[in-house]
Image (cartoon, helix red, strand yellow):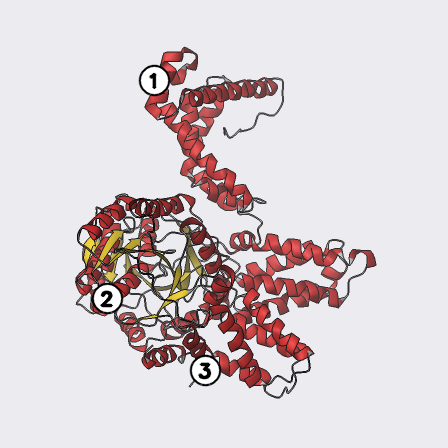
C-alpha cells in the first residue's frame, strides 16, 4: 500500500527530470527523501529509516540509478532488495531441542496478542505432527488462564495450569514435568503482558528463563506499534536474549514498519506472523514475501501455497476430466466454491494479488463474499438430482429453493443462468482443446 | 485536577531517558540560529514521539515562518512554540465525560484488539462507583475466549452488576438486555464492553453498528459516549482506526492507555488534529485508580518537561 504510494511519488519526482536527460546526485536525494517519508509513515523507527536510506543511497548514487532509463523502478528495486535484506534474507524456523520437550516461551507488552499466538502456535505444531502442551503462566490479567483453557479446548490441546497464585517459574517447571511424564514434545508457555521498564516483572521472566531454559523465547509484537517498538524490543532482548519475533495483527492495514525496526534493533529474525482471528491464522514468516507485500507488489507466493494446501490434486484432476466430458454439475460448482473460500476471506486473497490495492477495489469484494454465501445457500437448497440436472428445475422447484435458501426466485434464476453460461463457455474451451488448443486448468469462478 | 496527576504522568514519562525536551535541547546546542538542518532534526524529534508527519510538519512550518520573520529561535523558544502548537490542537480545557439528562448514560467502548478496553472499563467503573454512581456493565465481547469472565472479575472488584449472555451470543442482544436492566434498576451509567476488532473487518464493524443502533432505538440520545481505546504504543495506524471507527459509530472521545511505558502517545495529537476527537482519559498504570481524566495542558507538560 505505502509503496504503491511511494511508487507514484517517485514517478512524480523523476518525471520532472526526464527532459533534462541526466540525473544528478541531488535528484536521487530528492527521491530518497520520499523513501524516508514513506518509511516514517509506515512507522519504521526514525533511526532505522535513516540507516536504511543511507544504504540505499550508496547503491543508488552508483551507476544503477543514474544511468537507468526508468529511475523510479530502479529505486523501488533497490529499496525492495535492501528491505528484504534488512528483514533477514532467509526465513527462519523454530529450533527444536534435541532433548524433548522443546520449550517455547512467548513474551511481550500487554495486548500484543501472546495468549492467542500461543494457541495458534500449538495449532501449527500439531499440524506439523508434534504434541504440544500449553502452559498458563499469566497469573495477573483476570481470566487470562481461562482464555487459554478455552482456546486449548477448541484445539483439543491440554492446558497446564496451577492457578493464579503460583509463581510463573514454578508453573513453567511444572509444565515441563507434565510434558515429560505425558510424552508431550513441545511446551508453549504463555506469560503475562508487561512493560519493558517494569523491573520487577522483567525479573520474573528472568527467573522463568533461569528455571526452565526455554529453547525459544519469542517476542510478540503488534504490527501497529509505532516508534517505540525499538525501545521495547531492545530492552526485552537485552534482558532475556530473545530468539525470534512473532508479528501479530497483520490482517489489519497497519504498514508494519515496527517489524523492520525490531529486526534491525535486535538482529533476531521474525519467525511468524498472524493474519486473522481464526486459530490457524499463523504463518511462517517469509522476508522476501513481506518485503513484496509492503512494497505493494502483492504476495503471490503465499496465495499459491494456500491454494496448494486447500486444493486436493486428485480432486483437481477429476474436475478437469469432468470439464472435458462436459459433466460439470452444480455439485462440482459448490465444491469449487468451498475450496476457494477455504483459502481464506476473499479480501485477504485479493490483497495478495499484485496491483489490487486495499482501497476502492475492496468495496466491490465485500459484495463478492456475500454473493458467494448466497450462491452456496441456493445450491445447498437443491436436491442432489437438481444439482446434477438443473434443467428439471421448474417454477415450483425454484420457489422452494428460494424459500429454502432465504433468497428470491430472481436470485435462483440468475444463478442458473450464470451456471448455464459458464457451462457453454467451458464447452467452447473444451472444443478448442480438442482441436489442439491449450485447455489448461481453469479455476472456476462465478 | 490533583497534582498527583502530573507527578504520576511524569514518573511514567520521566522513565523515558531521552525525553523530548532533552532531545530538543541537543538539537539546538551550538546552533544559535534556526536553519533548515535544524528544522529537519526538530521534525525528526517530533516524529519519534509518534506525532505523525502531518502534525510534525505543521509545527515545523510555523517555526520556519517565525525564523523567516527574523526570530532567533533557541531551545527555549522552540519548546514554547511546540507547546503552543500542541495546545492549539489539543484544546485548553479538559473534556468531561458526557452525562445524559435522563439516566442511564450509555457509554460504548470500542477499539482494535489488545488496546485495553476491558481493563479501561473496569477502571472507569471503579472511578464512577467511587463517586457514588450506580454502574452496570454489559459483557458484549462475546467473541474472545474468557472476555466475559475478565469483565466479571472487574464487576466483582468494583461491585458493579455485569449483564452477560453466553459466549458467542449476539452482542447487540447483550447490549439491549443490559440497557433494559440499567433502566429498570435506575442505574446512572451503563458501560458496554465490545470485542476488539480490526477496523478493516467490515463485517465486524457492521456488528458494532448494530450494537449502537439497538441502543439508540431504546433511547434516541444514546449512546452518549462512544470511547475509542487507543494504545499509546500504536503508531500511524491509529489515525485510520479512529477515522473508520468514527465513521461507523461516531466516536466521542479517546481513552489513551499504557502511557506508563516509554511510548508517548503522540498519535493522539494527530487524531485530535485530523478528526477533532478529544482525549478523555489516560491510563498511566496497572492499578485500579491509574486511569485519569485527560488534561491537555498537563499532558503536554508531561511530554515536554523532564525532571
Between the C-alphas of marks 1 and 3, the distance is 73 Å
Image coordinates of residue A283 in percent, x first then y, are 42, 51
In this picture, is A106 found above or below A153? below
Image coordinates of residue A351 in percent, x first then y, are 51, 45
Q: Secondary structure at mark 2?
A: helix
User: Which circle's residue, 3 or 2, is located before the other in the chain?
Assistant: 2
Residue annotated with mark 1: A400
Q: Are marks 1 and 3 on the same chain?
A: no
Between the C-alphas of marks 3 and 2, the distance is 30 Å
In this picture, is A243 found above or below A367? below
In this picture, is A37 found above or below A278? below
Q: Secondary structure at mark 3?
A: loop
Marking on residue B305: 3
Q: Residues within 10 Å of mark 1 (few under 14, many from 20)?
A: some
Question: Given the image, what chain letter belongs to the residue carrying mark 1?
Answer: A
Q: Are marks 3 and 2 on the same chain?
A: yes
Amino acid at each position: 500500500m505505502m509503496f504503491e504510494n511511494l511508487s507514484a511519488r517517485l514517478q512524480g519526482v523523476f518525471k520532472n527530470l526526464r527532459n533534462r536527460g541526466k540525473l544528478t546526485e541531488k535528484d536521487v536525494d530528492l527521491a530518497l527523501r520520499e523513501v524516508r517519508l514513506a518509511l516514517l509513515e509506515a512507522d519504521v523507527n526514525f533511526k532505522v529509516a535513516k540507516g536504511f536510506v543511507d544504504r540505499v543511497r550508496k547503491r543508488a548514487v552508483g551507476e544503477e540509478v543514474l544511468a537507468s532509463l526508468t529511475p523510479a523502478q530502479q529505486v523501488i528495486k533497490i529499496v525492495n532488495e535492501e528491505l528484504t535484506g534488512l528483514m533477514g534474507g532467509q526465513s527462519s524456523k523454530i529450533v527444536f531441542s534435541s532433548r524433548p520437550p522443546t520449550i517455547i516461551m512467548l513474551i511481550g507488552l500487554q495486548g500484543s496478542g501472546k495468549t492467542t499466538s500461543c494457541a495458534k502456535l500449538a495449532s501449527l505444531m500439531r499440524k506439523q505432527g508434534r504434541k504440544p502442551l500449553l502452559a498458563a503462566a499469566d497469573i495477573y490479567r483476570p481470566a487470562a488462564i481461562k482464555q487459554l483453557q478455552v482456546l486449548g479446548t477448541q484445539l483439543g490441546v491440554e492446558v497446564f495450569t496451577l492457578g493464579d497464585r503460583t509463581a510463573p517459574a514454578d508453573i513453567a517447571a511444572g509444565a515441563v514435568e507434565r510434558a515429560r511424564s505425558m510424552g508431550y514434545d513441545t511446551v508453549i508457555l504463555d506469560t503475562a503482558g508487561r512493560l519493558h521498564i517494569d523491573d520487577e516483572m522483567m525479573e520474573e521472566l528472568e527467573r522463568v528463563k533461569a528455571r526452565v531454559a526455554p529453547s525459544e523465547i519469542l517476542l510478540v509484537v503488534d504490527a501497529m506499534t509505532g516508534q517505540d517498538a525499538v525501545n521495547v524490543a531492545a530492552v526485552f532482548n537485552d534482558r532475556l536474549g530473545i530468539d525470534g519475533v512473532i508479528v501479530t495483527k497483520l490482517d489489519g492495514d497497519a504498514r508494519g514498519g515496527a517489524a523492520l525496526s525490531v529486526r534491525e534493533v535486535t538482529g533476531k529474525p521474525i519467525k511468524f506472523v498472524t493474519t486473522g482471528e481464526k486459530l490457524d491464522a499463523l504463518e511462517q514468516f517469509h522476508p522476501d514475501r513481506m518485503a513484496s507485500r509492503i512494497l505493494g507488489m502483492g504476495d503471490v507466493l503465499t496465495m499459491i501455497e494456500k491454494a496448494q494446501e486447500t486444493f486436493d490434486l486428485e480432486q483437481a484432476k477429476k474436475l478437469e476430466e469432468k470439464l472435458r466430458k462436459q459433466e460439470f454439475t452444480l455439485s462440482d460448482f459448490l465444491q469449487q466454491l468451498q475450496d476457494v473460500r477455504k483459502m481464506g476471506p476473499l479480501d485477504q486473497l485479493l490483497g495478495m494479488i499484485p496491483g489490487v490495492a486495499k482501497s476502492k477495489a475492496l468495496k466491490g469484494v465485500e459484495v463478492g463474499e456475500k454473493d458467494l454465501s448466497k450462491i452456496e445457500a441456493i445450491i445447498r437448497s437443491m436436491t442432489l438430482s437438481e444439482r446434477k440436472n438443473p434443467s428439471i428445475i421448474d417454477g415450483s422447484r425454484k420457489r422452494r429453493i428460494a424459500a429454502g435458501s432465504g433468497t428470491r426466485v430472481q436470485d435462483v434464476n440468475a444463478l442458473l443462468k450464470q451456471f448455464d453460461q459458464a457451462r457453454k463457455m467451458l464447452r467452447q474451451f473444451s472444443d478448442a482443446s480438442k482441436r489442439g488448443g491449450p485447455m489448461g486448468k481453469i479455476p472456476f469462478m462465478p | 485536577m490533583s497534582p498527583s496527576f502530573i507527578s504520576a504522568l511524569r514518573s511514567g514519562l520521566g522513565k523515558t531517558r531521552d525525553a523530548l525536551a532533552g532531545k530538543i535541547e541537543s538539537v539546538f546546542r551550538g546552533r544559535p540560529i534556526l536553519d533548515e538542518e535544524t528544522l529537519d532534526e526538530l521534525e525528526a524529534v517530533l516524529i519519534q514521539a509518534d506525532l505523525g508527519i502531518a502534525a510534525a510538519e505543521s509545527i515545523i512550518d510555523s517555526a520556519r515562518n517565525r525564523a523567516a520573520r527574523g526570530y532567533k529561535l533557541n531551545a527555549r523558544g522552540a519548546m514554547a512554540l511546540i507547546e503552543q502548537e500542541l495546545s492549539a490542537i489539543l484544546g485548553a480545557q479538559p473534556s468531561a465525560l458526557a452525562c445524559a439528562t435522563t439516566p442511564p448514560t450509555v457509554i460504548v467502548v470500542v477499539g482494535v484488539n489488545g488496546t485495553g478496553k476491558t481493563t479501561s472499563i473496569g477502571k472507569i467503573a471503579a472511578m464512577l462507583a467511587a463517586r457514588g454512581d450506580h454502574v452496570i456493565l454489559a459483557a458484549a465481547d462475546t467473541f474472545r475466549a474468557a472476555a466475559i469472565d475478565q469483565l466479571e472479575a472487574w464487576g466483582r472488584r468494583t461491585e458493579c452488576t455485569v449483564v452477560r449472555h453466553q459466549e458467542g451470543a449476539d452482542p447487540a442482544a447483550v447490549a439491549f438486555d443490559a440497557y433494559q436492566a440499567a433502566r429498570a434498576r435506575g442505574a446512572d451509567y451503563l458501560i458496554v464492553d465490545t470485542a476488539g476488532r480490526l477496523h478493516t473487518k467490515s463485517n465486524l464493524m457492521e456488528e458494532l453498528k448494530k450494537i449502537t443502533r439497538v441502543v439508540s432505538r431504546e433511547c434516541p440520545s444514546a449512546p452518549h459516549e462512544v470511547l475509542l481505546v487507543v494504545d499509546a504504543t500504536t503508531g500511524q495506524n491509529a489515525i485510520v482506526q479512529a477515522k473508520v471507527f468514527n465513521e461507523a459509530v461516531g466516536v466521542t472521545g479517546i481513552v489513551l492507555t499504557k502511557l506508563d511505558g516509554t511510548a508517548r502517545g503522540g498519535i493522539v495529537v494527530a487524531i485530535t488534529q485530523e478528526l477533532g476527537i478529544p482525549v478523555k482519559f489516560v491510563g498511566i498504570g496497572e492499578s485500579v485508580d491509574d486511569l485519569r481524566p485527560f488534561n491537555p495542558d498537563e499532558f503536554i507538560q508531561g511530554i515536554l518537561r523532564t525532571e
